[in-house]
Amino acid sequence: MNAEFLDAAEEKDLLRAGKLLEKGANPNARDWLSHETALKYAAWQNNSEMVRFLLENKANPNYSGSEGNTPLHDAVLFNSMDAARVLLENKANPRLKNEDGHTPADLARQRNYKEILKLIEHHSK
């Protein structure tokens, strides 16, 4: 069931994801191969609607996956501004570091993503 839930999230299928959560799917389930979560998939895709839905259903905004990246790190890596905004509004910690010692703000600076950096800095105060 968790694999099907991850597929639904990656495919942007809110209805199916919701039904699977009702049946007991874990909102923090990890893909068995990549170890990524549905929230990380939604962050990559800048799918703010799915990000909000998952957070409302108890997905952990600070759950780290491969390389220690949180959903906020991933939103920055893909310059997913809307997803980053929703994550930050829902207690994503902008100070968490990945395995390389980088915060989401560090990644934004490295890539010269000025708007998303400004957003992170605003929520870091």
Image: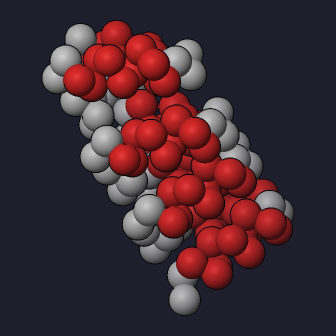
Nearer to the camera, 79 or 14: 14
Outermost residue toward the bottom in this view: 125
Q: Is residue 42 left or right of residue 59?
A: right
Image position, residue 45 (x, y; %): 64, 33
Nearer to the camera, 23 or 68: 23
Name which residue lies at 52% across and 18% down.
13
Q: Quadrant of residue 49?
A: top right
Above or below: residue 74 compared with residue 4: below
Image position, residue 115 (x, y; %): 80, 66
Name which residue lies at 46% across and 73% down.
95
Placement of the C terminus among the 4 image quadrants? bottom right
Nearer to the camera, 57 or 33: 57
Above or below: residue 111 compared with residue 64: below
Name which residue lies at 56% across and 22% down.
12
Name which residue lies at 61% across and 49% down.
83
**Residue 3 makes an appearance in the image:** yes
Image position, residue 6 (x, y; %): 39, 20
Q: Is residue 6 left or right of residue 50?
A: left
Above or below: residue 23 compared with residue 75: above
Image position, residue 88 (x, y; %): 52, 65
Outermost residue toward the left in this view: 24
Q: Quadrant of residue 86?
A: bottom right
